[in-house]
Image (cartoon, rainbow, N blue to C red):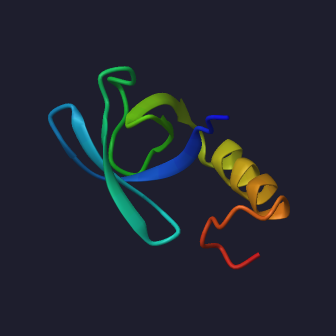
Amino acid sequence: MCLGVPMKIITVDGTTATVEMANVRQECDLSLSPGAKVGDYVIVHAGFAIEILDEEDARETLELLDQIGFDTGRGS
């Protein structure tokens, strides 16, 4: 099973972003979400930002992931 997770964009350099969740940072490709910018939440799957989320939707998704035992770094 594959899972796309919400991550917050920390930096953008061209079509590459540094994203973060649970104090883990990684790079992802923004080619599929060209409007994404620093501070946005994106769904990251297989190294690509596949969707931009508003902050409320991102937080709701992270809360649901917390409830099923996924470590989102939020301490829930």
Mark count: 0
Q: Residue at x 53, y 69 (%)?
A: 22
In the picture as drawn, the residue positioned furthest to the front comes out as 1
Q: Which residue is drawn at 69% across and 79% down?
A: 75
Q: Can you say which quadrant of the picture contains the C terminus? A: bottom right
Q: Is residue 63 left or right of residue 47?
A: right
Residue 29, image quadrant: top left
Q: Residue at x 33, y 55 (%)?
A: 26
Nearest to the observer: residue 55 or residue 26: 26
Q: Is residue 72 above or below residue 47?
A: below
In the picture as drawn, the residue positioned furthest to the bottom comes out as 75
Q: Is residue 20 left or right of residue 37?
A: right
Q: In this view, does 59 lie to the left or right of 39?
A: right
In the picture as drawn, the residue positioned furthest to the left comes out as 14
Q: Can you say which quadrant of the picture contains the N terminus? A: top right
Nearest to the observer: residue 55 or residue 5: 5
Where does the image place residue 9, in percent across and percent down from the top left? 38, 50
Where does the image place residue 4, in percent across and percent down from the top left? 58, 38
Q: In this view, does 42 lie above or below 75?
A: above
Q: Residue at x 75, y 55 (%)?
A: 65
Where does the image place residue 57, in percent across and percent down from the top left? 69, 42
Q: In this view, does 34 lie above or below 68?
A: above
